Image (tube, rainbow, N blue to C red):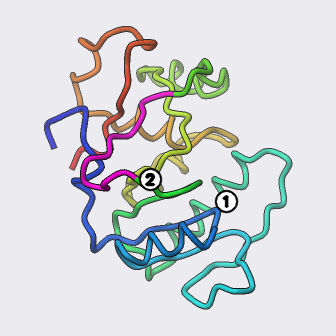
Amino acid sequence: MVDAYCPLGLWDRQWTIVLTNPMRQTVRAAYELSSCLIIGVVPNWYIGKSILSPPRYHNRYSDQLRWLQKTIDEPSVTENFLWVEDELPKLPFNDLRIPRYTHSPINPQNEVLLIERGHTTINYETRWPCVFNKGRLQEVLDTYRPPFHAPTIYFNHYNIEGQLENTPPRENLVYCPLEAF
C-alpha cells in the first residue's frame, strides 16, 4: 500500500477477525464479514472458535499483549488479522477509516520506547479495529518490553517509510495507516 491514510475497506474478507469484547451484536457483525475468533473471556452462549484467557492483570495493556501473543501462536488465525477491542463499526465497512489518535496525549512509556529507537511518536491509542500482521507483530513483541499499547508501538514501528515526516502536527492527524505490505 502506498497511501498512508488507508481505508479499512482494503481489509481482506478472508482474514480472521479476533474479538476481545464479545457482545452478541459484534459477533454477528464479525461472522457476516469473515471467520471469527474470541479471545479472553468467552461468553457461555458462544459456540464458535475461541481461546479462553481471562484477564489477570490490573493493567489492560498487559492483558492485551498476552492475548495478542496467544493470537499470534494460534495456527487457525490468518497471517493478517483484524483485531477488534470494542464494536465493529456500523458504518459501511468499505468506507471506514481508522482514527489515528485519541484526544489524550501519547502514553509516556510508549513515547520513551519509541524515542529510544528513533521512531516517530504518534498516538495510535484507539479502540477502533486494527489490521495486524503476525510476523511484524511478533517482532514488535520481541523488541519492546511490556507493558505498552500495541497499536501505538506497532504503527509507529511499521509506518510507511517517509510518509509521516511531512504530515501535519499530531492534533491535526485524523487517520492512521493500517499496514504497509
In the image, is 10 to the left or to the right of 50?
left
Residue in front for this viewpoint, 71 or 93? 93
Left or right relative to 2: residue 122? right
**Front-lying residue, 30 or 65:** 30
- Residue at 51% x, 18% y is 115
Q: Amino acid at mark 1?
A: Arg
Circle number at residue 66:
1
Closest to the observer: 91 or 49?
Answer: 91
Vertical side of 177 occupied by 37: above or below:
below
Q: Is 145 situated left or right of 73 in this image?
A: right
Q: Is residue 33 left or right of residue 54?
A: left
Amino acid marked by disc 2: Pro
Residue count near mark 1 (Cα–Cα under 10 Å), binned few <14, some 14–19, many ≥20? some
Image position, residue 82 (x, y; %): 41, 60
Please give the name of the residue rendered at 25% of the width and 33% of the height, measured from the top-left corner. 5
Q: Which mark is residue 120?
A: none
On the image, the x and y values in percent for residue 106 come to: 59, 22
Q: Residue at x 69, y 69 (%)?
A: 40
Q: Where is mark 2, residue-wise?
A: 89
Q: Where is the N terminus found, in terms of image quarters? A: top left
119 in the magenta segment:
no
Q: Quadrant of residue 175?
A: top left
Query: Magenta segment range?
Result: 91-101
